Image (cartoon, coloured by chain):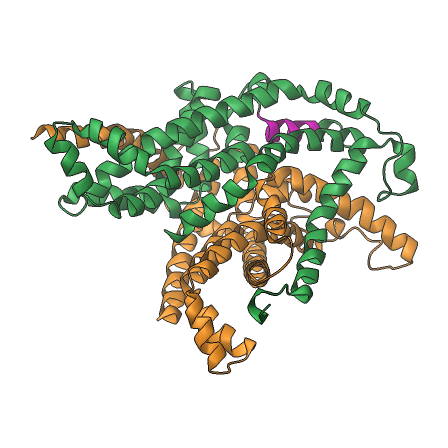
Amino acid sequence: MTKRQAAFYSMTIPALLLFFLLHTYPAIQGIFYSFTNWDGFSEGYRFVGFNNYASLFKDNNVLNSYLFTFKYALVVTILINVLSLLIALGLNSNIKYRNLFRGIYFLPNILGVLIIGYIFNYFFSNVLTQLGDKLGSDVLSVNILGSEKWAWIGVVIVSVWQGIAFNTILYLAGLQTIPKDLYEASNIDGAGKWTTFWKITFPMLAGFFTINMVLALKNGLFVFDQIIALTGGGPGRSTQSIALLIYQGGFQGGEFAYQSANAVIYFIVIIAVSIAQLKFLQRKEM
Amino acid sequence: MNKENSTNWGVTLLIALGSVLILIPLYMTISIALKNPEEMANSVFSLPIGLHFENFANAIEATNFFGALKNSTIITVVAVGIILLTNSLVSYAIARNMDKFKFYKGLYFYFISALFIPFQIIILPVVKLTTTLQMNNIPGLIILYIVYGLAFNIFVYVGYIRSIPIELEEAATVDGASTYGTFWRVIFPLLAPINATIAILSCLSIWNDFLLPLIILGKPESYTLPLVQYVFQGQFSTDFNLAFASYLLALAPMVIVYLFVQKWIINGITQGAVK
């Protein structure tokens, strides 16, 4: 082995070992426990084969958490991408105080989700309801976070409010990669704004669109902090996301093994969704 | 003046209206933090009259703000510093060898495949492991951030390092520099733009992270700012002025930093994204 190769090994082997110990090994353990009946505290446990997995599919709480998480993630992904693309287009055009507005629109991204959640929690439960009372509006005077039917909308609003910032910056970066002469050419050809957007801007942004969609959906499927701060999973279990269910069941509910099985399924679902999404969006890029 | 350079007032107006939606919750936070309950009863949106700075003093005491600020700062600064030094080094070794050796190519995919593993699949065993290894404290948390950063950072760094011409280091090697010497003196300085991006993104995610401190940190003395808000919320959920003073204190450090380096942050991320 040359000295150079030895140096390269010394750069990577420690990272490899640490990563294996702190990431891969726990993941393997998680899979291992998913085949047992361990509650997380007791001394002993025994193997139960695929029992946990079989039970998952009959568990209404699990089913509900998947339904909520997917519904939420889908809506958030679409809203974030539509709005942040529009904002990026606005911030990229000839407007006054462009840098100031860029600064403002990125601001939510630097604020912690948990604290933002607490602030919005107050906004939904106290400010909006008071406003509703004053206006005599029945719709507004009810705290949406307290409604099984509408609480998820509250979580969506907070996630979109915060999530737009990062995607806007990525779209803005994408817009700056589009050569100006393409626009000049379409201008000379007499193309309208709408045509120019669909024929030039959007195709040129395809790569950024893919990244943003994948990122937003992945973040949506991992939702946790917002829910802790806004609803704690309630009312009932109407906003219990998969991540929250695994956390609550695994740490507080004595369901360590059972929720490990849930985490494995969650992992498989994430992989399947990511691959499907990448394939679909990349085909569109062509 | 031609059409291209004139201000588009319609869009400016729309953008300004949108930015109001972003600023309202922040205005509300500041004004509630400065009011007392009687002023709140009148109107939530009105400007505060009395400026009740005692809310802040009480919040600082109730949450041990300075302790949490110190913990958050130490964790973020140390973790981000070590991330820049180590994750770039690992990425360099991978980037320069992945075309020649299967080991490094495998390593690359091994690390970035972790991007798709939901954290929930490992949190339960990680808590057990960190307790056994006595890593359920601030140094342990820092190590976890450094190691978990590898997945995303290698993805970004490797792409960037591969775009740096290899001739640059060959010259250094001919001059007798070691592999490490070449990295620190030739490559690392060239990584400045991507280091800025990684530093900003890591800093934001570590500073604002809630789940990992929640499950790892055992002692209240080592709690971070977001974690303190969580504990505090459970105890004093009715005194909103106190609560909002506390939220504002927790948000303030990052906002202050942001005000000073705003342009740099936005450029750092956009440049990182384009590469």
Front one among B116 and A247: B116
Residue at 46 percent across and 41 percent down: it is: B120
Front one among A178 and A232: A178
**Secondary structure character of the magenta stretch overall:** helix
Front one among B37 and B215: B37
Residue A41 appears anywhere in the view: no
Q: Residue furthest left?
A: A1
Verify whether residue A103 appears in magenta.
no
Q: Position of residue A179 (x, y in %)?
A: 41, 65
| Relative side of B176 to B1, left or right | left
Q: Quadrant of the N terminus of chain B?
A: bottom right
Residue at 32 percent across and 30 percent down: it is: B86
Q: Position of residue A286 (x, y in %)?
A: 35, 71
Vertical arrangement, residue A261 with respect to residue A270, above or below: above
Q: Colour of chain B?
A: green
Residue at 38 percent across and 69 percent down: it is: A285
Q: Quadrant of residue B43?
A: top right
| Relative side of B34 to B144, left or right | right
